[in-house]
Image (cartoon, helix red, strand yellow):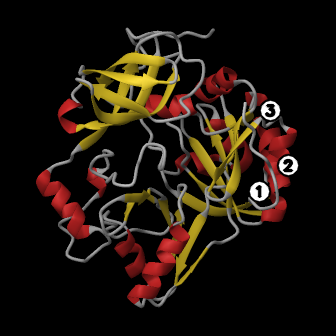
Amino acid sequence: MPQLSLGARVRKSPFFDRAVGAGAASFTVYNHMYMPTGYGDPLGEYWRLIEGVSMWDVGCERQVEISGPDADKLVRYLTPRDLGKIQPGQGRYVPICNAAGTLINDPVLLPLEDGRYWFSIADSDMLLWAQGIALAGGYDVSVSEPEVSPLAIQGPKAMEVAEALFGGWVRELKYFAFRETQLEGIPLVVARSGWSKQGGVELYLCDGAKGGSLWDLVAEAGKPFDIAPGCPNGIERIESGLISLGTDTDETANPFEMGLGKYVSLDREDDFAGKVALGEVANQGVRRRFVGFHISGERLQSGSQHRWKLLHKNKCVGFISAAAFSPRVKSGAGGNIGVGLVEAELAEEGQRLFTESEAGTREVTVTALPFDLSGRIERS
């Protein structure tokens, strides 16, 4: 199999050495940083996330900080979501679009205090985008990347670990809410968030020199709950219908296509990036929709490495962006599932199509997201 060469050119998180020492077997590059993608036991890591608790090095989830007198104005211009009277300590999931209405990031916005915000970003150069908008618009702000690196604790037992670390207050956090605190002298922002539907927290480390110490404290607190290292899980995210920017989106995907229309407020009186283009999409209707697929054939042995073309009457009508075998999805197709974009008129549940995969042509059936998990479980 091809290998990713590690070197000094690509940045490493403060948790990198601990992750390697714990057996990280594969990596990807995300926001110009290495991110672990597996520890050698894909199904074991999946079940630990589903039934127990997992800790993830997601230091590549970088922050774009906007601060200064015009910070509020710039933040509101960058997203089509109406932020209302957003308050410090309560985060928001916000789409970010360019002038053409294309989705170019989907971060969580963390308002730290009046005039100071973090965008906790997905994999794209939003720092450069925000700096360019600030310069072109003459905003009186500073746009920077602080030295902040998240460590995630995810799974149904995640809050037990978090409570062991911080006390009962952590359970009172609403989803996307956060608090600045310290753990044995380590400065942190603790947020009720994470890239899974299993629940948990993200610990935003604010002193990179203490990454190893934070990792060790989490690992020790998690021992009674059988915690172990993991990573954002490809199977669980497909089951849950979570969007992976750049995997599921292409150069024209917009929030309406991706099912994020509820975060677009076209009736706002103020302007925002992409407002005219998104208004046109809303008036004309979307060309494609982000949906799930049941995939026929033998069990998929690994995730998809390429986008698979979707075919209807020998015409390409979209693509499957990610596919995997799910041990939990109830499916007549045998547990193979995927997500992707398909032409809107073919996006109805039950629509039958074909896909060209690495394993040959397979029949697929459109389904709603998230997937139905009320049926079978297969552990082997």
Mark 3 belongs to which amino acid? Answer: Lys
List the residue tagged with mark 3: 223
Closer to the chain start, of discs 2 and 1, is 1
Give the amino acid at mark 1. Answer: Lys
Q: Which residue is mark 2?
A: 17
**Earlier-in-chain disc, 1 versus 3:** 1
Q: Are the two marked residues, 1 and 3, in contact with CB atoms closer than 8 angstroms?
A: no
Q: Position of residue 198 (x, y in %)?
A: 53, 34
77 to 376, vertically: above or below: below
| Image position, residue 3 (x, y; %) | 75, 39
Quickly name the residue at label 1. Answer: 12
Q: CA distance from mark 1 to mark 3?
A: 26 Å
The span from disc 3 to disc 2 (Cα, nearest Å) is 20 Å
Please tell me whether residue 53 is drawn above or below residue 208 in the rendered image.
above
| Residue 175 is at least partly visible in this image | yes
Q: Relative to 226, does residue 263 appear above or below in the rendering?
A: below
Quadrant that contains the C terminus: top right
Q: Dividing the image into 4 quarters, which one contains the N terminus?
A: top right
User: Quarter of the image holding residue 76?
Assistant: bottom left
Q: Are marks 2 and 1 in contact (CB under 8 Å)?
A: yes
- Name which residue lies at 48% across and 72% down: 129
User: Which residue is nearer to you in this view: 192 or 147?
Assistant: 147
**Which secondary structure, mark 2?**
helix
How much space separates mark 2 and mark 1, taking CA atoms?
9 Å
Can residue 94 be seen here? The reply is no
User: Around disc 2, counting alpha carbons within 10 Å, would you say few (fewer than 14), some (14 to 19), or many (20 or more)?
Assistant: few
> Closer to the camera, 319 or 278?
319
